[in-house]
Amino acid sequence: MIGAILLFILAGIGEIGGGYLIWLWLRDGKPFYWGIMGGIALALYGVVATFQSFPTFGRVYAAYGGVFIVLSILWGWGIDGEKPDVLDWVGACICLIGVMVILLPRS
């Protein structure tokens, strides 16, 4: 399970970081190579997610969506200085409960 969590976090950093670099390139006028680095990070995100041991694509990506939400809130707080409020944390907890339900073993 620790391996799965680490893969979700790595994939999240790749997707959020890649999107952030492209955002900075297109919205904040950073050099074009920021966009290229963002594209590479986004491609790596797609690759990292395939290493999950869960059997179906849909469940992996549905669960990843919840993890992505939590990581996005943390990214906004740590990188952009946007402090999460109570509703952000409530929503993040709801998402993590959803992740756990989706990844429950099936009989």
Image: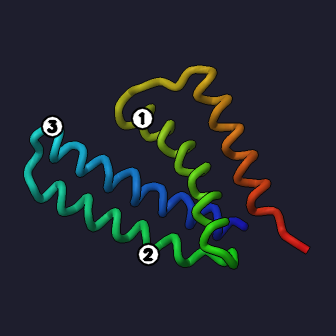
Q: What element carries label 2?
A: helix
Question: Could you tell me which residue is drawn at 82 percent across and 63 percent down?
Answer: 104
State the residue lying farthest toward the front: 58
Residue 99's x, y, as percent? 70, 53
Residue holding disc 2: 47
Q: Nearer the viewer, residue 4 or 90?
A: 90
Residue 63 falls in image quadrant? bottom right
Question: Could you tell me which residue is drawn at 75 percent across and 62 percent down?
Answer: 103
As shown in the figure, which amino acid type bears the numbered disc 2? Val
Residue 37's x, y, as percent? 22, 62
Would you say 46 lies left or right of 85 here?
left
Would you say 85 lies left or right of 16 here?
right
Q: Image height check: is 96 above or below 5?
A: above
Residue holding disc 3: 28
Residue 9's x, y, as percent? 53, 58
Q: Earlier in the sequence, mark 3 or mark 2?
A: 3
Q: Image height check: is 15 above or below 43?
A: above
